[in-house]
Structure formats: structure tokens, C-alpha cells
Image: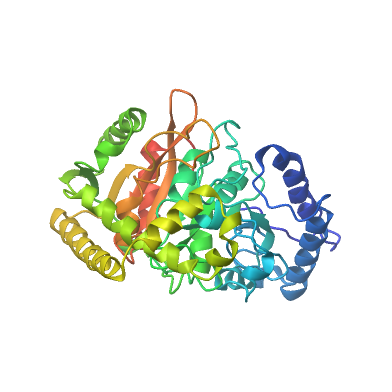
Amino acid sequence: METHAHAADGSLPATSDTMCDRIDESDSAIRAFVTESETNTERRERVRQELRSVHARWPVAGSRPPLFGVPVAVKDIVRVDGLPTRAGSLLPAEVFTGGQAAVVDRLREAGALIAGKTVTAEFAMSAPGPTRNPHAHDHTPGGSSSGSAAAVAAGMVPLAIGTQTVGSVIRPAAYCGVVGFKPTARRIPIDGVIANAPSFDTLGIFARTLSDVSVAAAALCDHWRTVRAPERRPPVLGVPDGPYLERAGAAALAMFERQVAALTSAGLPVRRVSLFPDFERNIGDLFTVNRYEAAQSHAEWFPRYGAIYREQSIATIRQGQAISREQYAQGLRRRQSFRTDVSAATEEAGVDVWICPAATGPAPRGLASTGDSIMCLPWSNAGWPSLTIPAGRAANGLPLGLQCVGRAGSDERLLDWARTIAGPVSPTDL
């Protein structure tokens, strides 16, 4: 990860300007960032000042924190002191005022520079923002963390923060060909984040390499523990056969089977396990809880501002309003049963890491939709940590990702094991 050190003469380097230059040059086409001003001079001056501040706070190289001088983009549902939050909507910024998010506090304590706010689908739901996929501008970058994934993929920043409720980190990371990491639910505090469905909402990380994700995760996640060398061993990989895996498209499945063959040839143990036999019911249960909570999150704003909500957001909230408290409570009970069943099946099969496609296929053409989150759904329902690594390309040249999922609380092991998994399947040096 590029950091911003002093120049040889002791002056501050021009690297903050270089980062702003990259954004100015690339973002007119990609549209990953929320505009700070018509000329973007405000961003340049703000980042310069942040760079001066981190140098003043940590002047000695040996004592600098892990993200010293690293520019980080932040999804525009996360409150950042000094920058307005609009959540991808037309609602007035004052609706979203409040204290800075805990994750931004941690970024700044780790020495990071806030490069700016990135585009999100409206309220982190499904109404897309204007962001383009850097690999093909007429294809979606995914969502709802569209701007964060695209900003990293386009080389504008080395690191970005997003959120995932169902598939909003893993899917855009796969579509944009970068590494995406969604920790165990609540491993990064969500204070100061505009809620979608609070019992699912999880902060996540985008980067170009596994190493960069690991450094950021250690700085941002609660109680991070370094995996020691004696604990390292090859993971037992599980393939979740059945109705879930069958939801992937032909291109994703064909590439996935090639990835499984490559991992097997590399000597990693792979076990095929029938999983999620009631997958259609699992889908219904998740959306019962999700939609109900989304409606509750907007119970104050929607009556006042519903006329300026976008069509997709209105539909989500209306669906949630039609769900009774009793149906919601039943959905929560079923979710807990689902989590118990998945844990038991994983334990019985002796699986360390489940592997599967990160999305149903490459990024779809068009910008009217953010794509299908179904390949992320069971893992988000379980609250388990998941990771996508770039792994091959579809026939049209667009990236595909391999999703790796560990048990709740196994985030450190998952990232460590991912290095072993990435070797045989990744097209790049991660």
C-alpha cells in the first residue's frame, strides 16, 4: 500500500496531489466519488491538510501507525467529520447529521487520509448510483458499495470502505476485479453508519491485494489476533452442492469448477457437501427480516420525504411495511435455526472454508441494476466472514471472483488461509 512519507529534504511530498490527480483524471468517466465541489479544489486542499496533520502527529517514521498516509475512500452512508452524508439520496444532508462513524475514527487513529465519499445505491438498497465499472463502462460495478469497489479497481485509491447487508461488498468486488472482505457481523462497529437492515449491516473493506486487506482489517476490526506460524495449516475446503450453488450462471459455474480442480491439483483437500436444502425458504426468511428492518430504519424519514425516494427504495420500504411484527419475529427465529444448522453442517463435514462463486456471473451490461446478490445471501444470513478474490475472467473479459467463507469469528484464519487458496486460482499476485 502506498504511504506518504517525507521527501528527502523534509518537506511534504506531492503524493496527496498525485492521488487527487488520479481522481480528477479518472472519475469523470467512472463516477465513483461524490463530488465535493465543482472544481474539486476542496478535496485537494482538504487532503493536503490531512497529510500535514498525520505528519505532525507522527513525525518519526518508526512510530507511525499501519495506515499512515494511506488514502481511503468511504461509502457515503458512513459519517465523516467535515464531509456531508447524503446516502445516495436527494434528502437534505441535515437529516443524516451526527457523530463521526467509529470506523472513521479507527481509520484516522491508524494514520489514514480520507480521500472522499464514494457513491452508494440510494440508502444502500438497490437504486443504483451513476458509477461505471472500470473494466467496461456500460456494465454495472455492482452495489450498493459501487463507488468504493470502482475507486479501488480504477487505481484512484488503494483502500476503500463499504457495507454489506446481503451482497454489497462481495458482489461489487467480484464485478470490479478487486479483493473484498466482509468481516463477521459487527466485528467493525457500525456506529455512525446510516442503517439499512441493522441486524445484517456489516462494514467491509476493498483493496487490490490480500495483504492490504489484512493490514486494514487488523486496524479496524475488534480484538484482531495475528495468526502465528505454528497455527498455519492447509484449510479443508468445502463446496456447497445443491440448490444454492445451482443459482450461479453457466460462466460462473464453469470457472468455479476449474478453480476447484486447480485447488485439488495443488494438494488442498476439497469436500463436496450437500448444503442449504431449504434454500428457497432461507431466501424468504432473510428478506422478511431485511425488508421489515429497512422499513423501520425509514419510519421517520419516509413519511416526510417519500416523494423524493427512488422507485426501488419505495418498493423495499412498502414491502417492509406489509410485514407484521409477528412475521418478523418468526423470521428472526428461523434465522437463528439456520445459523445453528449451518454451523452443525460445517462441523460435521470438517470444513474450514466454504468456496463458491462470488456472484452469479460477470457484471451485467447496463446501469439500471446492481446485479444479483444471491450468492452472498446464505453467508450474510449466517453473519459469517466472507472474502472474494479475483479468479479468472468470463468470455467477455470481465472479472470473476472466488468467494471464501469462514465460520463466525474466524476472520483472521480466513484471511490467512486465503493466501493459500489464492495461489492456484488467482490471475494476479495477491
Colour scheme of the picture: rainbow
Q: Is residue 161 visible?
A: no
Image coords of residue 365 (percent x, y): 51, 30
Image coords of residue 361 (percent x, y): 40, 34
381 with respect to 183 (left or right): left
Q: Relative to the observer, which residue lies in front, 402 or 26?
A: 26
247 with respect to 123 (left or right): left
Q: Relative to the observer, which residue lies in front, 22 or 34?
A: 34
Is residue 179 depicted above or below 425 in this figure? Answer: below
Image coords of residue 101 (percent x, y): 58, 71
Is residue 255 depicted above or below 378 in this figure? Answer: above
Q: Is residue 98 visible?
A: yes
In which quarter of the view is residue 301 placed? bottom right
In which quarter of the view is residue 332 placed? bottom left
Q: Relative to the observer, which residue lies in front, 3 or 184?
A: 184
195 with respect to 324 (left or right): right
Residue ranking furthest to the left: 348
Residue ranking furthest to the top: 395
Image coords of residue 219 (percent x, y): 53, 68
Q: Residue at x 66, y 59 (%)?
A: 70
Is residue 390 depicted above or below 76 in this figure? Answer: above
How many numbered marks appear?
Answer: 0
